[in-house]
Amino acid sequence: MSMSDLAINGGKPVFDGKVVLNGDRVVFEGKGAIDLAPAWPIPYPETEEKLIEVYRSGKWGGVKKYEQLLMDEFSKWQGAKYSAWMANGTTTLECALIALGVGPGDEVIVPGVSWIATAEVPIYVGATPVIVDIDKETFCIDPAKIEEAITPRTKAIIPVHLFSSVADMDKINAIAKKHNLFVVEDCAHAHGAKQHGKGVGAIGDIGSFSFQLSKLMTAGEGGCCTTDNEEYFDRVFRASHIGNTRIHPGVNPEMGMICHQYRFTDFQAAIIYDQLKHQDELKAKRKKSADRIMELLKNTPGIVQQKSSCADDDRAYYFFAMRLLLERLKPGIDRKFLMKAFQAEGVLLHEGWGAPIVDMGMWNVPQNLYVKHPTPVCEETMYQSGLFSMGNLLLADDAVIDKVAEGIDKVMRECAE
Ligand SMILES: Cc1ncc(COP(=O)(O)O)c(C=O)c1O
């Protein structure tokens, strides 16, 4: 095998197809790995009946059947006592901060790599986001950097269980306890994930889930907050239901706690309810495939998997994420070339969001509204070393998974040492 055997250089691709080079672009004409994986989201026939049932019932809003079922069954599945459902996973983060009394004058520590919502919500409540670096191995917020960023104004931390890893909640909770801080887990990527056997979303004070279209469970849009704490549940529910309560009828919301109308509909609830039944099976298949790829790549130079924070993390695999060992790449080889070389083999890997939060085009927050600590690992991960695939790739047949590993191995053996 040599460089000329790579499909990008005219060799035969690992997946069946033809490679067309169009200037800087690689077009793979054929069925590559992602085309052979189930399209996302997966529709379930029984959901169509539920949607008709909801439509005919007229109970599209208000107190509704499938939302109530989710409040019981999703909470139980996730290992939390309570869940409050709302419009999306941005409103959930905001309502979690409102519920915990985070407001003007407070600082909230967030990681420099996430979707921008994680860093923007503190601003919604008048607080200041304080952006810190991530850990190189797990891509999740670095607990040591949290400690360095704490000031007398710090009120909360928002760790994100990013891509397929769970943040180091032992260390984060210990820091929070020591400094009397709240922890809001951003679980947008982590439906069903656990650490030490406990579901994410109830390891900190409040968890926040997104059900946006790409997520592991989705109704197109949707969100929920989970918690083990009855008072936080009541406050999150009130914050998202214009002050209303499910557990203290007749008791008005606390004076000054400004609440929103962020309710979601029973159409969304019915879709998510059916997905719940398939989650354990889908999660097991994604994990099996991820383990299989990494077993096949165990002797491949220059590339490693995104690591878990703890040995007993039970990961959900929203993304399959890897890291290039830059020091092992041969001269002249970089991520841009490798992504093209993988694509030519039929293995589409991407660069995630392509930038740390503050460099994303949509982040238009004036500099006086946030604090940013140095984030060299965020920059390296987003600009140079991170390689990602959506989790539905991991739902493909084993034969496809084996070829994904073959394609990555073929390219890396020529490009790294
Ligand atoms: C890490 C993270 N947090 C929060 C959100 C916000 O969720 P939503 O899009 O449902 O508002 C997302 C969504 O993409 C996300 O990836």
Image: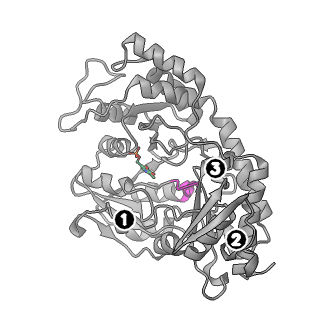
Callout 3, which amino acid?
Asp
The residue nearer to you, when weighing 100 against 26, is 26
Q: CA distance from mark 2 to mark 1?
A: 32 Å
Label 2 belongs to which residue? 7
Q: Amino acid at mark 2?
A: Ala
Whether residue 22 is situated above or below residue 313 in the rendered picture: below
User: Which circle, 2 or 1, is nearer the viewer?
Assistant: 2
Q: Which residues are magenta?
A: 161-171
Which quadrant would residue 100 be assigned to in this image?
A: top left
Residue 397: image location, x then y, percent: 75, 46
Q: What kind of element bears circle 1? A: loop
Task: Provide the secondary structure element on which disc 3 rests.
Answer: helix
Residue extending furthest toward the bottom: 331
Give the residue number, with chain letter if any, for mark 3: 35
The vertical placement of 274 against 257, above or below, is above
The quadrant in which the N terminus is found is bottom right
User: Nearer the N terminus, badge 3 or badge 1?
Assistant: 3
Furthest residue to the left? 256
> Mark 3 vs mark 2: which is more N-terminal?
2
Q: Is label 3 in contact with label 1 (beta carbons under 8 Å)?
A: no
Residue 317 appears anywhere in the view:
no
Residue 407: image location, x then y, percent: 73, 65
Residue at the (51%, 44%) spot, across then down:
215
Which numbered disc, 3 or 1, marks the residue closer to the eye?
3
Identify which amino acid the numbered label 1 is placed on: Met
Q: Is residue 4 left or right of residue 34?
A: right
- The colour scheme applied to this rendered structure is one colour
Residue hosting label 1 = 360
Q: Is residue 242 left or right of residue 207?
A: left
- Camera-nearest residue between 28 and 110: 28
